[in-house]
Image: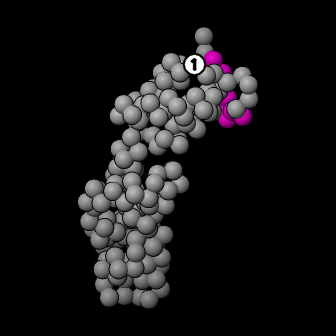
Amino acid sequence: MIEHVPAEHDGSADTTTDPTTIRAQAIKLLARREHARAELVAKLVARAFDRDASAAVVDDLAAEGLQSELRYAEAMVRDRVRRGIGPIRIRADLAAAGCEAETAEQAIADGEAQWIDVAASARVKRFGDPIPSDIRQRAQQTRFLQRRGFDGETVRAVLGN
């Protein structure tokens, strides 16, 4: 029998508090991909599980090494680098997901991305190979790279001084 799962749950009295059931659902979610602690708790609450019970189960999973903020952050960094996103935006995305700044910095440092190469690749993919000499095109490409999360030094290195 397929149960109806509400899109968002308000935390009312009809929530499930059974840790075994919550754990099973949390493990199913973690089997698909890494999740930040806050994200995993929110998904469990959306599936009509009690917030406090869900948080306790996620804490237990983290203690067992089944849920890890660092692994989540590293996976997000790899994904964002592959998509041509820079470190400034990656930090913001990790903060929005509830990762601590220290964890975000460690994941970004561990990723060992060559930010100039990532930015250059994103620029070429969007605008083609030649570096623009026209000031308007140069400004357009600068804004593009800044929106992607690259700092001024990296943008200057990619577009030339």
Let me know if residue 6 is in the magenta part: yes
Picture coordinates of residue 125 (x, y %)? 36, 65
Q: Main secondary structure of the magenta part?
A: loop
The amino acid beneath tag 1 is: Asp
Quadrant of residue 47 within the rendered picture = top right
Left or right of 35 on screen, residue 116: left
Left or right of 133 on screen, residue 38: right
Left or right of 83 on screen, residue 140: right
Q: Which residue is mark 1?
A: 18
Evaluate whether residue 147 shows in this view: yes
> For this rendering, which residue is in front, 117 or 54?
54
Picture coordinates of residue 44 (x, y %)? 57, 31
- Quarter holding the N terminus? top right
**Could you tell me which residue is drawn at 28 percent across and 56 percent down?**
111
- Establish if 115 lies above or below 29: below
Chain part drawn in magenta: 3-10
Evaluate whether residue 121 shows in this view: no
Let me know if residue 34 is in the magenta part: no
